[in-house]
Image (cartoon, grey):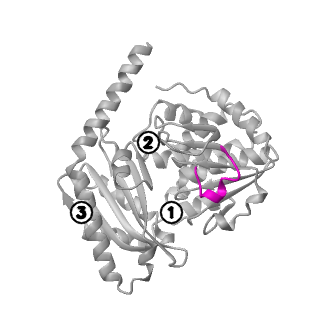
Amino acid sequence: MININFEESAKTITSLLQEQKNIAIIIKGSPDPDALASSYFFWKLCTLLHVKATIYGFMPASLPSNKEFISIFNIPFNIVADLKEINLSRFSGYIVCDYQIAALEDNFAIIPCIIHLDHHSPAEHDVPARFRLLTDKVSSTSTLCALLMQHISFVSLEDVPSLATALYVGIKTDSDDFKHVGEYDTMALEYIKPFCNMTIIEQIENTPLTPHALSLLQKAMKNAIVYKDWLIAGVGFVEERYRDIIAIIADYLLQNNPVELVVVYGAVYHNNHTKLDIDASFRTRSEDFDLNELIKNITPDGGGRKYKGAFQVHIDYFVHCPDQDTLWEIIEMTTNQILKNQRDSSLKIVLQSKFKNFKKILKHLFRL
């Protein structure tokens, strides 16, 4: 187990926030419960320290349960098309939670990254951050926030229940209903669970899927192919507000099929059909498979950790294609072939992963 001094980290974070006058909290990826809960945590800390903070995201919450999450906790989530919509001169710095890379667009480099938290291993190249805590030894960024909260004395008993409840949902979601919790996750849950409002948690979790979500699931099941021990499924064109359903479908297909890995992808329209991406969600039940390595072999615009990952490839040029059926055939044929090629070379990734784990064990032994 890694050794993180959460007490010292909490002091550093508090000190850094106290130096700020106005800070931007950026949700770079999908606004899922983990990203929302950890961003809400830092927004609340800023509020308690009398520091102005604004949460920005580039994608709307697509799942009904995530919309309910935002509503219940009254999270001030501002959706912008891109960074050009943000008045940079207002901010002294920014925070990124639940994303492997803190770097934003070049024009955003005029303000520094103050805090960067994520539950992936650090990327090779990234912008400097005044405080950075990245580790794949936890299931969620919410875990890190919960363990930090233990050592922040100015968080009052009045504030703890809402923060604890939000972070609990973040941990539960990203650990696949606690199937993949580690020692730090257990410590975090032991701390926050007594403060949680279970009625609110049930309300969020019992938010029903929309008919459209169910229709996308049916389409994925119809289009699914099994290549060796991988299941690959395309869902066609998807509006941005339904993007998160791709990940939900990947979870469902892995639970209900005897395969080692599931990939679900779709062509997602953004910004009123002015942008188009291929979005893919990966799920595996293998501990020995390095999803991050697999995804980086396909595109740098994505990443993974144990059991799950995702990528996004921009294909804006094809927004103007007049024949969607033909375009989808090309996307499906190409993506399926790329994934099949990756499956054929996956033994190399498994061996690399085993070798990395072996090196970690040796390092640990020699430290002892």
Q: CA distance from mark 3 to mark 1?
A: 36 Å
Q: Which residues are magenta?
A: 103-114
Q: Earlier in the sequence, mark 3 or mark 1?
A: 1
Viewer-closest of 152 and 238:
238
Residue 340 in the figure: left or right of residue 315: left
Quickly name the residue at label 1. Answer: 207
For the residues carrying marks 1 and 2, which lies nearer the camera in this image? 2
Horizontal side of 3 relative to 227 (left or right) equals right
Residue 201 seen: no
Magenta stretch contains residue 213:
no
Give the label, 3 or 1, closer to the camera. 3
Work out whether 260 lies above or below 266: above
Direction left: furthest residue: 228
The x and y percentages for residue 301 are 45, 56
**Amino acid type of the residue that numbered disc 2 sits on in the rendered structure:** Phe
Looking at the rendered structure, the secondary structure element under dot 1 is: loop
**SS for callout 3:** helix
Dot 3 amino acid type: Gln
* Rendered location of residue 338, percent (x, y): 27, 60
Disc 3: CA contacts within 10 A as few (<14), some (14-19) or many (>=20): few
Q: Residue at x 31, y 82 (%)?
A: 325
* Res. 178 mark: 2
Amino acid type of the residue that numbered disc 1 sits on in the rendered structure:
Thr
Mark 3 vs mark 2, foreground winner is 3
Quadrant location of residue 360?
top left
Label 3 – label 2 distance at C-alpha:
34 Å
Task: Return the disc, 3 or 2, that comes first in the chain's sequence.
Answer: 2
Query: Quick one: label 1 or label 2, which is nearer the N terminus?
Result: 2
Question: Which residue was labeled with disc 3?
Answer: 337
In percent of the image, x 27 and y 58: which residue is there? 339
